[in-house]
Amino acid sequence: MARIKMYINKDVAKICECSLSTVKQYAQKPENSINFVGDGKRKIFVWFEADIKRFKTRDVAPVGRPSVKTAEQEPTQKAKSKKAKK
């Protein structure tokens, strides 16, 4: 008989190499349908392999500011440098 592996938030965070708070926030959303045991703060989320696959393939927005300079910024920076040389 095949055994079904179950994981908790801490295990999923280690497997997916992300923070525990990210895993908890994902699990708490009802549209993600992660099974749980308990109530309130003592709620324990029970993850299965299919849940972990869905978590890994979720859409993630890029974090941080873009490092690419826009075309508008470059001429103003050059103009400032010419004035500084005089």
Image (tube, rainbow, N blue to C red):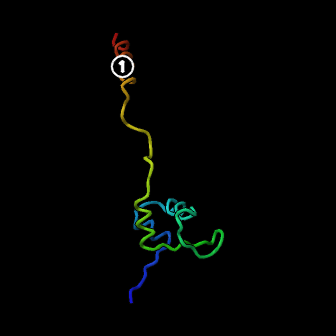
Q: Residue furthest bottom?
A: 1
Nearest the viewer among 6 and 78 is 6
Of the residues shown, which amino acid type is indicated by label 1? Pro
Image quarter where the N terminus lies is bottom left
Nearest the viewer among 86 and 55 is 55
Q: Is residue 65 above or below residue 84?
A: below
Residue 58 occupies quadrant: bottom left
Residue 65 occupies quadrant: top left
Q: Is residue 75 above or below residue 70?
A: above
Q: Residue furthest top?
A: 86
Q: Name the spot of residue 23 as percent of width and height, x first.
A: 50, 63
Identify the residue at horizontal 40%, vertical 38% (top origin). Answer: 66
Q: Could you classify mark 1 by the number of other residues whose Cα lies within 10 Å: few (under 14), some (14-19), or many (20 or more)?
A: few
Q: Is residue 85 above or below residue 45?
A: above
Identify the residue at horizontal 40%, vertical 67% (top origin). Answer: 15
Q: Residue furthest front?
A: 31
Q: Tell me the residue that label 1 is attached to.
A: 75
Identify the residue at horizontal 53%, vertical 65% (top origin). Answer: 27
Q: Is residue 38 left or right of residue 79?
A: right
Q: Name the spot of residue 29 as percent of width and height, x first.
A: 57, 61
Image quarter where the C terminus lies is top left
